[in-house]
Image (tube, rainbow, N blue to C red):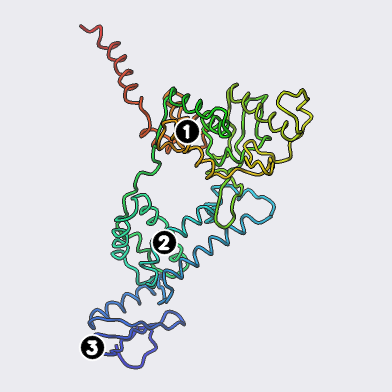
Amino acid sequence: MTGRRDYGDGSLEERSPNRWRLRWRVGSNRYNKAFNGSKRAAQTELRRLLKSADDGQHVGPDRTTLTAWVDQWLALLQRRQTEASSDRPAKPTNSPSAKRKRGLVNAKTLERYAELLRLHVTPTLGGRRLQQITAPEIDALYVKLEAKLSSSTVHAVHVVLGSCLNAAVRKGLLIGNPVQKAEAPATGDHGAAGQVLDQDELARLLDGFRGRALYPIVVAAAFTGARRGELLALRWIDFDAANKTITIRRSLEETKAHGLRFKEPKGERGIRTIAIDDNLVALLCAERDNHRRILAGVGQHEAVDLSLVKLPSGALVFPSAAISRIDFTRPRHPEAVTKNFVTRATKLGFAGLRFHDIRGTHETMLLDAGVPVHVVAARCGHDPAVLLHVYAKRTRKADTSAAAVIGAMSNAVLGGAE
């Protein structure tokens, strides 16, 4: 296949030994490609290119590198996020499920995508053209990363890189995604169980925080199962003392691009109303009265009708603890809460305990007590299947409880058989 042609059937031009120029046409577009190898191999490649055109799956040679595409993809996600969060009337399509269908991610997730790709992928494969990247190269990347990163992080790289290259396929830059042909790394320990406290341990922990600024936050976490960000975004309008409930409507997050800001709770189940007990109601009422006294400038023992003191619109239940500037609408810094919690918990003998473990303790205690999993999941804004998966790692009582039930059945069925 040499000589002058219209490229409809393709042609080969030998440039030097085992170096060829492949030429072909798809519709009105003409393409050419350098190829190294034998003549037979060059002919095979040309036939593949022509067949892809016949099958409607042809992707022309593109010089876009992985680094360039990563930048384009992240910019696209950023643009969608900005458009979704612009000041426009809310529509039904703003639900979490609809956002996922439109390819939307929140700011924190987008930062994580950029970190995974730019720190762990592009330093190795970034200079390669998209169409040159192969599954063995991706396998080699995973092996390299597994030597220095946790298995869960490597798996996260795999998932994000796969999504990134799937988008390149949709844009017509690739025929297929090489990540799908690579060996998927181990998933790691997603949904790590963390530490779970029993009732006595939880009582000792809470008693150790009594009298400290974090005390009401830790108590609220222990008896609602709410996430840190949800508690720090809780406003007094979300607290209903008469009906003994709090409603989770938003969460607090910090990103490099936007700093501290409020967002929708995590997942479709995030917006929810939680029933609370009399003790927590009393604690929150006392906290609200304390805020009113601070705002009114009256002491703890001065007689005053606090119901006449109106807190500002948007006042937070757990606002910033900054002494120099009292602003009840200013949120606490989430990392400061975590740092102070860990420091105090360690001094109390709970080394390694995370703030998030208080949520896990709440869930585990309810499930151990026999509360149905769907009730606990709804209360905590969880997927029931995920909750059961994590609970299986946490619980200390499941196996002994099962043995006790089997023992009772055995006595009832077999005890009188002798």
Q: Residue furthest left?
A: 418
Numbered label attached to residue 160? none
Q: N-terminal of the two: label 1 or label 2?
A: 2
Given the image, on which type of amino acid does mark 3 rest?
Answer: Pro
Q: N-terminal of the two: label 2 or label 3?
A: 3
CB under 8 Å between discs 1 and 2 = no
Give coordinates of residue 300: x percent, y percent: 70, 26
Alpha-carbon span between mark 1 and mark 2: 32 Å
Given the image, on which type of amino acid does mark 2 rest?
Answer: Leu
Given the image, on which type of amino acid does mark 1 rest?
Answer: Ile
Residue 256 is left or right of residue 372, and the answer is right
Q: Quadrant of the N terminus?
A: bottom left
Residue at 34% across, 48% down: 187
CB under 8 Å between discs 3 and 1 = no
Q: SS for tag 3? A: loop
Q: Which residue is mark 1?
A: 358
Q: SS for tag 2? A: helix
Place residue 316 in its image quadrant: top right
Give coordinates of residue 236: x percent, y percent: 67, 34
Place residue 139 in its image quadrant: bottom left
Give coordinates of residue 222: x percent, y percent: 51, 30
Residue at 40% across, 38% down: 352
Residue at 40% across, 66% down: 122
Q: Residues within 10 Å of mark 3 (few under 14, many from 20)?
A: few
Q: Residues within 10 Å of mark 1 (few under 14, many from 20)?
A: many
Q: Residues within 10 Å of mark 2 (few under 14, many from 20)?
A: few
Q: Which residue is mark 2?
A: 119
Q: How many marks?
A: 3
Q: Nearer the viewer, mark 2 or mark 3?
A: 2
Q: Nearer the viewer, residue 45 or 221?
A: 221
Q: Which residue is mark 3?
A: 17
